[in-house]
Amino acid sequence: MTYKGYEMVIGLETHVELKTDTKIFCSCPTTFGAEPNTHVCPVCMGYPGTLPVLNGKVVEYAIKAGMATNCTIARYSKEDRKNYFYPDLPKAYQISQYDLPLCEHGWLDIESEDGAKRIGITRIHIEEDAGKLVHDDEHGTLIDCNRCGVPLIEIVSEPDMRSPEEAVAYLRKLRAIILYTGVSDCKMQEGSLRCDVNLSVRKIGETEFGTRTEMKNLNSFQFIAKAIEYEFKRQVDAVEKGETIVQETRRFDSVTGKTSAMRSKEDANDYRYFPDPDLPPIVMSEAELDRLRAQIPVLPDQRKHEYVEKYGISPYNGELLTGQMEIADYFEAGAALTKYPKTLGNLIISEIFRLLPQDSVSIPVSAANMAKIADMYGGGLINSGTAKKLVSRLWEEDADPAEIVEREGLGQINDRESLAPIVAEVIAKNPKSIEDFRKGKLQAVKALMGQAMGKTGGRGNPAVIQEILDAELEKLK
């Protein structure tokens, strides 16, 4: 994406809440949606004299995420205090990692309609979450500390993305990988996965980075794309006017679609990092790393490669089918039962994805019945319109699609001798469309095609009807 001769440079900082039962440094539960300030204790509230104890599951989960994203895992790392005075962090510092993170130098590949691209991952480190500010018209700003101490990993990408589409593709892929590992539920609506977008602009062909801004806490793919589009144009317009881009943190307003300044952006030295004196270093043995590595499941890219090689599915569609483990499992169960796995994949992408509620993977149509629809469609027994109708029918009540086709006479009409009179009738009854066709208006052909399909009750073979219609129209030129 370019604008006025400029390109955008994007890096993402993704915060992922880990799916542990208890918090990172205490035994308080991490359950979402509890009454405010009920999942707290002296440790996560930062009372004087308390001592944190590291939750070992947090380290294991962070390492699994690093392994799944091709990172180098540190044998020795430590935790640091990051000092800042925000009202949602009672102890006025956050335990994070600075110079010795658990995971570094990783990457993942994204697929777009333009092809594959590798996005670098700078680091993955563990840290504790802050609380939540609740703004109330009657009582002012309230603080819920339930989230204080919930374990996070922060995944920092390289500034390798150049469009909103690439940023969203990266985040979708990252979410898929994390879901496969099982270390987080990645529920964006609950804040389990949220993203900070760092963006700068530069003239096309330049190699130096511009001054970046950071858009905080975006938890929707749609909002991320809109925030990037607005901020990119805002920065370009400012530079073109001779204004200086300020390094700052900005807020995105989903109602107006605009970003606005929150505060000046801190540098690392502003946080006054120092090693946490209450926590020992994290030391990992080869045996421990081997144990965790053995727990990594078959990941999206491995499955996608198999779909491309075995079923002839495009890499882009393979990316879509492997975006959630449950969908990939569903596809593979159906692919084992059909002669047309590529057709099955297309139906899942076009119809199942259309009907699935957001953030749901519960499909009421059995994989076996979807395989039957793919067989009938791929074998020419039904057309695409009927296949789509069957998926919608089975979504309401799962049943044998072959029986429905037989009982209701939904089979595709492939016989040219049956379709030719229908096409002739449509041509005879639409002289205006024929006149438009002679004037070069291609829309007229689509109108005639639609009428012919309608007269067959949507059961006509579109390819055969189109052939007959083209031949008849050629005679009328």
Image (cartoon, rainbow, N blue to C red):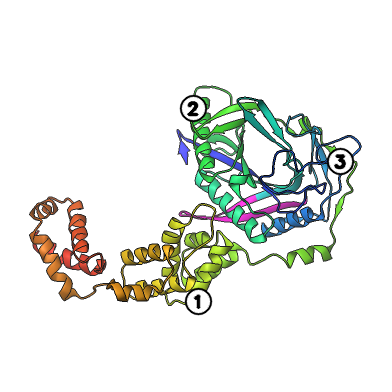
Whether 145 is drawn above or below 63: the answer is above
Whole-number angstrom distance, CA of label 3 to CA of label 1: 54 Å
User: Which comes before the other along the chain, label 1 or label 2?
Assistant: 2
Residue at image point 8% right, 55% down: 431
Frontmost residue, 260 versus 451: 451
Q: Return the x and y of residue 260 as percentages of the image width and height.
A: 56, 27
Disc 2 secondary structure class: helix
Whether 325 is drawn above or below 49: the answer is below
Q: Which residue is mark 3?
A: 275
Quarter location, residue 144: top right
Q: Amino acid at mark 2?
A: Asp
Q: Which residue is mark 2?
A: 237
213 sits to left or right of 452: right
How dense is the environment of label 1, judged by Cα within 10 Å: few (below 14), some, or many (20 and up)?
few
- The disc at residue 336 is 1
Residue at image point 64% right, 50% down: 120
Q: Return the x and y of residue 256 as percentages of the image width and height.
A: 48, 31
Frontmost residue, 96 versus 370: 370
Frontmost residue, 5 versus 178: 178
Q: Return the x and y of residue 89 as percentages of the image width and height.
A: 76, 34
Q: Is residue 12 visible?
A: no
Q: Amino acid at mark 3?
A: Pro
Residue 433 sits inside the magenta stretch: no
Disc 1 secondary structure class: loop
Dominant SS type (magenta): strand
- Contact? badges 1 and 2 (CB < 8 Å): no
How dense is the environment of label 2, judged by Cα within 10 Å: few (below 14), some, or many (20 and up)?
some
Residue at image point 61% right, 36% down: 209
